[in-house]
Every structure is written in C-alpha cells, then in structure tokens.
Image (cartoon, helix red, strand yellow):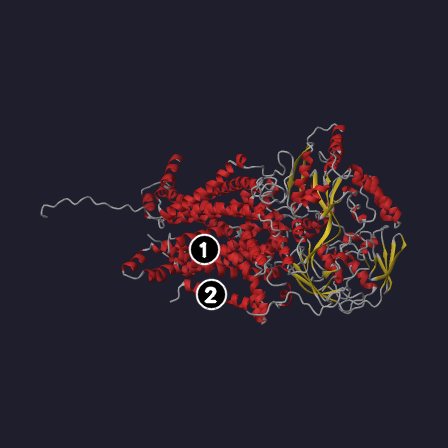
Amino acid sequence: MASQLIARAGRAFGPVREARGVPRWIVWAGIVLTLLFVVMALTAPWISPYEFDQYKDASGQRFVKQQAPSSAHPFGTNVQSTDVMSRVIWGARTELKVVLFAVVVSLLVGLPLGLLSGYFGGPVDRVLVLIMDALFAFPYLLLAIVIAFLLSDKFGSGVATAAFAISAVYIPQYFRVVRNHVVSLREESYVEAARALGARPRTVIGRYVFQNVVQSVPVIATLNAADAILTLAALGFLGYGIQPTDAAEWGYDSSRALSDAGAGIWWTGLFPGMAIVLLVTGLTLLGEGLNDVLNPVLRRRKMEPVTLPPRAPQEDEA
Amino acid sequence: MAKPTTSLRTYALTRLALVLPMLWILLTLVFFMMRVAPGDPVTAALGGRLPEKELQQRRHAAGYDKPLIVQYVDYLGDVARLNFGTTITDDRPVTDVIVENGSATLELTFWAMVVALSVGIGLGLLAGRLRDSGADVSIRMFGIVVYAMPAFFLGFLAQLLFGERLGWLPTSGRASPEVQFLLPTHTHLYVVDAIIYGDWATFKDVVLHLILPAATLGLIIAGVLIRLVRVNVLQTMKGDYIEAARARGIDEKSVVYRHAFKNALVPVVTVLGLQVALLMSGAVLTETTFNWPGIGFELVRYLNNRDYIAVQGIITFFALIVIFISLLIDFVNAWIDPRVRY
Amino acid sequence: MRTRTSRGLRLFVLAAAVVALAAGCGSSSGSSSGGSGGGGGNSDATIIMGTTDTAIHFDPANAYDLHSWNIIYNVYDELMTIPPGGNKPVPSLATSCGWDDPKTYTCHLRSGVKFQNGDPLTSKDVEFSFQRSIVINGDQGACYLFSSLATCGKWKGNEISTPDPQTVTFHLTQPDATWPFILATGAAAIVPSSVYPATKLQPDDQPIGTGPYKLVKYQPGVQTVLERNDAYWGTPAKNARVLIQYYKDTPSLKLAIQGGDVDIAFRNLTPTDISSLRGQSGLKVVEGQGIEIRYLVFNVKLPPSDQLAVRRSIAYLIDRQSIAHNVYNDTVQPLYSMVPAGLFGHIDSYKTEYGATPNPDLAKKELTDAGIATPVPITIWWTPTHYGGGSADEYTEIKRELEGSGLFKVTLKSEEWDQYAVDRGKDIFPAFQLGWFPDYPDADDYSAYFYPNGGFWNGHYDNPQIDKAIDQEKASTDPSVREAAFAEIQTLAAKDAPTIPIWQGKQIAVVRDGVSGVQETFDPAYIFRFWLISKT
C-alpha cells in the first residue's frame, strides 16, 4: 500500500519534468537556493571556520568584540565576540531543524485530519472546521508566542519548543486547504462513479483523492516552511526563541544587531538578515515555481512542432 | 450534479449562529493558555524583591490561587456582562486600552492596507498581464523578497535610511512629543483629529509620522497580494469566456481590463479577510520597531507581565474583529457565488 | 466604467498628493519651545526626556518602580529628602525631625504649604497618607517599607499621633535607624486627605501633591507631562514644563536623542549605544554613581553550592573587570561587596578576601584542599530581559571564566522572568542571577533583605552573627556603631560567599548640549530632580 502511494505521488509530479520556460527557471532557482542552505546545514561542522559559540582562537586569544569584517573573520564578530560567519552557517542547521520538524508535524497531523474530515463530513467535520477556523483567526505570531511560553516550562527554550509552537500555527492551514480540496473533489463525477461501483472509502481516498490532493501539498509545504522561518525569526526577535548558547539562530542574532546598526556596526545584522531573506526567497521560489508547474490551470505544456506525414498522392489528383 | 442551493438568508443566519461557538472556543483557549502558563502578575512585578511568603500572601489576596474552574466560570460571566475589567499591571480600564491603543493600530493598519492594495493589486495585475516577461519576473521577485524580509528588519532599514541618514521622515511615535501633548483626541485617529484641530503644522507632523510604518507594513502585505493577484489573473485568463471574447474580435486590452481583471479580483477579496490575521501579526513587529503605541505591542507587554485580564480583553477584541471581517467576506462570497452556501 | 486598477491608482495618487502637499508647504513644526535666551537657561523652556521605562502608578500607596517614583518625587513632597549629591536625609516638608526615644520620632511641619488644589498641609494629611498606604496595601506598593510602623493591611490607630496641625509623631514598634531614610522614599509622599480616597487608589492622571510640578497629562505608554507649580513653597523649578516621552525599545530612543526629538535620554540605552554616542557632536554622556547591583546567588542547600569550597573557588575566578569592560563597555563598575560603593559603611570585603583580579591557583587550592574532584559540574541560571539585555553576554562571560580554569563544567540555563521569579523560590536553581535596586540609599537596605531567613530569595544561608549585626545597625543611630556593624556583616559574608557581587551600575544619561543640571541630580538617591534641569 505504501509503495503504491509513493508511486502515485511520483506520477503526480510528472509535470515538473515537462516544465519549460520561465516557470522552469523559477523552480530551479528555488531548488538551487534551498539546496545551498541545506548543504550549508549538513556540512556545517566542516565548512564553518569556528564553533557557533567560540569566542577565542586556538591559541586562547579572545576575538575582538564587534570587529569589522577581516580576513580572520570574513563577516566580522558580534557583541558576544563570536564569529558572524560561523553563526550564519550553524544557523542554517538550526533553521532547517526547526522548520523540518514543524512541517513534518503539521503535515502528519493536518493532512490526515483534513482528508478524513473532508471526505466523511458530518458533525465531526463541522466541529473540526470550527476549531481550526478559530485557531486560524488568531494572529499567528501571538499563538506561537503563547505556545512557546507554555512549552518552555516543560522543554526549556530550544528547538522542540519553537518547532511545536510553529506547527500549532500551521496545522489549521493544512487542514483547511486539504479539507476544502477534498470537499470539492467529493463532488466530482469520477469519485461518484467509483462509489457507485462499490469502492470502499479506503480505496476512494487512497486512489483518487490522495493523488489529487498531494499535488498541492508541496506548494503549501514550501510556502509554510518559508513562513515558519519568519515566525522563528520573529520569536527569536521578541525573545521567545532559542538561546544563543544552545544554538545559532538568525532571528535572535538580528535582534541583538538592531542596536548595533545605530552605532554603524552593520555586519552583525546584515548577514543573518540576508540569510533569512535568501532562504525564505529560495523556499518561496520553489513553492511558486511548483505551483506554476503543477497547477493545471497555470501550467503550460511544451509545444512540439507538429510535422504531418507527407501527403500521399491521390489517384484522382493528376 | 449540484446540490440544491440554500437561500442567502438561511446562510446568513447559520453563519451568525456559528459566531458564538467560535468566540467561545477562542476565549476558552485564551483563558487556559494564560492560566496554565507559568507565573502570575504578582510574581512578575515583585518576584525580584519579596520573599516567597509575601508573594504567596499577595497572590492569595488577588485570588490567583482559586481553583481553575472557578476562575473560568468567573471569567465567562464577566465577558457575558461585557465587563472587561481593569488591567492588573497599570490599573487601566481594558476598554480604555482597546479604544486608545486599538485606534492607533486601526489607523496604522488602515493606511498600510491602502498601500498594500494599491501597490499589490496594481503590480499584480501588471505582472499577470505581462506574463513571463522581464517586468513580470522582476515584479514577482520584488513581491517575494519583500515578503521574505522580517518586518522588524525592513522597518529598521527604513528607519536608518529615511530617518537617520537622509533625515526626511520621523522614525517613531504617532507625532512629535509636543504635538502629541497639544492635539485634542476626539476620535483617537490622529489624522482625523488633526484635520478637526485645523492646524496645518500639526497635520503635517501627524502625516509624516504615519508614512514609514504604514509603508513598511503595507509593502510586506503587498508582497503577498502581488503573487495572489497575479495567479488569479492567470487563472482567469484561461477561462472560456475570455477565449470567446477574443474569438469575437475584441482587442486584447479590452479583454484584459474589462473582462479578466474584475473577475480575477473576486477571490482576492476572500483572501483579504485572511490577511487580517497576518496584518495583526505584522502590526506587532511594526509597532515595536516604530514605537507606535498600538494594541499589538501592548498585548505582548501584558502577556509578559501575565496580566491575564488585559490579555483576555484584547484577544476578545481581536477575535471579534477577525470574526466580523470574515463574516463580511463570507457574505460577499455567498452573495456572488451560490455554490458556497450551506 | 471604472476598473479596480484605476480606482486603486486614484487612491494612491491622492495619498501621494496629500503627502507631497504636507511635505512641501507649511511651516516646519517647532521642536522645542524656546523663549528669549537669558544667561543661564531659559526658565520658560520645555524639557523633553525620553525613556524606555514605563510608569505604573502615581499614587504613592501603590507605586514602587523607579519611574513611578521619579514622577512622585517631582509632583509630591515627603517629610525628608536626600539633597542633591548627598547621601543622608534632611528635612523637606518638615522643618526639623528627631528621635524622642529609640522608638519615637517627631517631625515639625513647615507652615504655609499648600497642596496643588489649594488645601493647606496639616499633620492630618501626614497621618492620612501613612494610614492609607497601610490599609490599601497595594499589590504594586511598598507598604512593607513601613513595617517598623505597622503591619501591612492592619492599622491600629495608635501608630501616629498629631498633637497639633504642625506636629507629627511616629510610634515605631521597634528601634529603626533607617526610619529617616524611609520617610524620604516615594512611598512616604504626602497626599491631601480631603481628596484622596482612604481605601481606594487615586486615578493616575489626577495626582495632587505639594511638589514643584503639577501633572497635566498622562497618556499611558506614550507620554507624561508636568508643568511648574507656581505656588510651590520652595525654590521654583528652572523650567516651565517637563515632557516625558516613552519609547518601546532602545534603538528608537537612540534615534530620538540623535535626531533631537528629545533633550535627555535616560534608561535604558545599551553599552553599545553609549559608546557610539560618546563621540557625537551636540551630545554629552553624563555619568553618576549608581547603586543598583548585580550578583550571583547560591542556594546553599543544593549541590554543588552546598560546599563552601566550591563557592569560594568561584569567588576567586569571577573576572569583574572583564565583565565590566567587555560586556558593558565600562558603563558599570566592578563590585566587591554586597553594599555598593558610595554608601556609608561600604568596604571592599570581597577584594580583601579574594583579591581584585581572578586567582586560578587559589581557586584550585580551595577545591583540592576540600578533596573535591574537578571539573565540578554546576548549572547556573539567568534571565534574559529583567536584569538588562546584557545578561546573556554576562553569563556567557562567567561560563567562560569558570571553564577557562579547567575547574568547572558550566551548564547555562535561562528562563523568562515570570517563570524565573516563580522557580527561584522552589529550590531548583543551585546558582542564579539576581539584581537589587535599593529602596533607600542606606546599607541596611542591602543587608536586611539579603541575610536573615535565607534572604528574600530563600537561599537557605543562615548566619546568626550577621543577623545580630543587622539588629545592631538598625537599632543604633550612632554612625560609628553602624559602621562597625556593617563592616562585620560584609566581612562575614565575603568569607562564606553565599552570594558573589559582580557589578554596580552607573546612572547614565545622554544629554543634548545646552541642557544642564543632570549631573547634579545624579547621586545614590536615584531621585531625578527635574526642577534642577535647565536648557538654554
């Protein structure tokens, strides 16, 4: 069953290979940019010049605080005398950890809930929709802050707390989109036909609904990943995120850098800020590009020139 | 095969009836989050000075150690009587907080929306019209990058550039300190009040203070709108009636401007309602960066102080606004598209 | 037919036109009202001060934070006050005060003083003010300061006697040498009995006192405006109006002082901000002695803090100079006693005991002599915002100092203030960050709350000798007796190191050229005397 699902999902993404022109460049730009950060995160221990909390070099000499970019510190140092470039590189790891965690949790909860609720309908559906709408109405940042508050009591302020806070914000989104899609699919003729033929709900959902719905998931997932990074940065900025001694986090570093900027110290804020912008842009491009390519209304097929076979001479055409 | 559609009136009544449960869920959520969260207002204020015994006495005197259910029932009762109480940290009636700070946020978000709509819709339509051209790609990139910037970062860069370096625009507050002191606040919307007051210098001061915050917040929302409008334009342009119009020989410009655009914007209206939540969240960060005395920042401050009375009152206010707006949007949608009704 | 685009465009153009008009025409809005300049300061000037502090209440019965007391000191008067640059109380609303016996303190009131609503000041108002504070027992208030007079919430009626309208006698329940200091605090401000409710609070925008300023506007979170009281009994203020503008965060405040939106920026610019503003033309950085302190606390019941050798070893390793210089850019000074420098009775007891700079060898010796294996694992807790944004850097620095010697393995943990304030009383933190802001500038305020009953933080440290010395200094008004007692307290504390003092803050303000008087008002009393500020 699982391998069948995976095969179906693969077929659903066929159009990506067929894309041409601007949408193709956008998807690839997004992939490259995102991969850049993924590679950065994975290879951090090897490519980063220093540890994220390192404040002196091998000989025991302290780094100068808030030093401008130089050959020893290409991105300069910040107010805690740590190297900005190292914190940007290690920060990629933190961001991706949190975002991956958050997206996976949101998907695992939101997708099945949306599928089942949309397909079966009834009072359970109504109640779920009500709850999800209520959560959706909450300004997302405030929801994340309150949950971060609550969880920091149990788990301390770390990756897990931030990730749960963010996933709580996005579960209603997945739920809504998937459910609405399923509800509209339910009315389609081929689904009705399948049910008329006696197919069990499991088959209908697995074979028809899932494949359709799963197409929209990557778009939402990448766009939500982009949003998740912004939310994490906002949490870090307001002080509810990850502590600097636990891990490097771009949002926190940006918030400390705000008071630096007024003093003419631009490097502590520019590089983490740019990292946020680039990664979010990459993910968004990926999502937008995928949308362009997968959304049947938007996508454009490659135009092959049609060559007709040479005309056979007709008998009465002399 | 379509279901029979219900009348608009039935839909309206059903939707209205659903408001109350939604509100109740939100309020319950807020209540439990606040009480379950660690700490209380007494400890927040005096935890750095008083021994534990003293703190316990004060907590007891304020009723923070009553059983949760009792506090919950009290709370629902208060809300039902529209008694939002007075804040704990600074003894302000919560309604005062909502009126004064709420109108600051209202003014900010209104003008931010003006910026967002004009820039977002304008550029989105342009991008959709000129699909895949250089202009389209640059507009899309602009939309993406602007949205990718954290609100506080964009805000601070704007402050630094226009405020510090160029010195053109003020960087914090709704008005200069002395203008603030002299301006009589009837509506609490400073632009309106300044017009009523009739003094040109005051009006100018207030408008100048509004520019950077509204532009920052507006641009971020515009980033989302650009892409949304563009996608909807593209989808609409694929429609059969567009092809029919072209087939009838109508020139491309009329096709686009008279037929496609209007319809492309209808789904955008729906999404606008959803943007209210985004607007509020962005407002919190913008208000902090620009020192704008709005309700988003006050909410975070009260949250930090465990001032649950203030927080509940403010969240109720938020919830009512969001619910009201989404109701409005749903009505508009249902009026236009009968398939949407229950 | 109008389409959406053109309507959107029209709105945009309209908005742009409005803005262009606004920017183009019109006179420039005035920034500060000047008047004719005189020689030393324009007495009609408006002083604008920016701060990130917020006000809580202006009713003395329910106010306790620094900023609220600032306003209270300027709008009301107290029986005693600390004069500028001084550190001992002198009569203010009173003409003379003295001890009849160790538990009875009598003050003679100034005659002819009127409240800002015209009512004359009598001893009835004084009794009313104290009674009210005790009865209301505000949860944001400091009624516990009056614990020598009465128990909070319980007024018996015999605590104060008023034999005539100009005389007030306090009957204390125990001898208290700090009583004159307490009479000079903001909690002891005198309110009019005819106006203020006896059991409820006065609204914050309607305070009435006898002080040099009247409050004319209070917009919470935005601004407070004071105007000179022309009927004041004392020297009139040097300016006509004070406008306090509240800023949400330090970057905004910094931009404001740089751009000339405010004349004075006071609390809480970061060390980075101060460094960068120091060189700027048109601005001066004014520094004064501050007496707020920061220290590391040990819970002597939890390991490893329960071992004296561990505490002493850490005391040998803390590098105060490094913290003051690297973390705070010298906006704070190293502190060698729980009683800060500048107060009567202060001695550098930790310097005497452990040296002025870190001594890793002696630190190691403490541990080896006690037979403790190194590195010693220890968890140190701190809180990110309540004690200043530099806390993160400060505790990172401390971790580095302790681990650099190879003797300790430090785990740093932090919690937001609300959770932190609750957890610190629960015997969870072996070592943690605390700060102290004095109620009054006397060393007693730094001893009575720190040692008896384990200190207000319940650290379980108990030293009967110190407790006795505290009773001694409280009971005696003889300076030499008090000095000896304070010396004993500080020396004993240094030996046992239940806490380690780290730094003492300076009062720092950034002031525009032409504004003077800020230096004069910076003294350990923490009374920001607006009436001394003048502007040319």
Q: Residue at x 37, y 55 (%)?
A: B130
Q: Nearer the viewer, mark 2 or mark 1?
A: 2
Where on the picture, by quarter, is residue A19?
top left
Q: CA distance from mark 2 to mark 1?
A: 19 Å
Residue C275 location in percent, x, y? 67, 50
For this orientation, the residue located farthest to the right is C100
For this orientation, the residue located farthest to the front is A71
> Residue A202: in sight, yes or no?
yes
**Residue B225 marker:** 1
Q: Amino acid at mark 1?
A: Leu
Residue B47 location in percent, x, y? 70, 47
Q: Chain of mark 1?
A: B
Q: Residue at x 41, y 62 (%)?
A: C5
Residue C461 location in percent, x, y? 77, 39
Q: Amino acid at mark 2?
A: Val
Tell if the residue under mark 2 belongs to the same chain as the one under mark 1.
no
Q: Is disc 1 placed on a helix, strand or loop?
A: helix
C173 vs B205: above or below: above
**Residue B265 marker:** none
Instruction: Determine whether, in the image, residue C414 is placed left or right of residue A133.
Output: right
Q: Which residue is mark 2?
A: C13
CA neighbours of label 1 inside 10 A, class few (<14), some (14 to 19), many (20+): many
Residue C381 location in percent, x, y? 67, 40
Q: Quadrant of the C terminus of chain B?
A: bottom left
Front one among C504 and B285: C504
Q: Is disc 2 placed on a helix, strand or loop?
A: helix
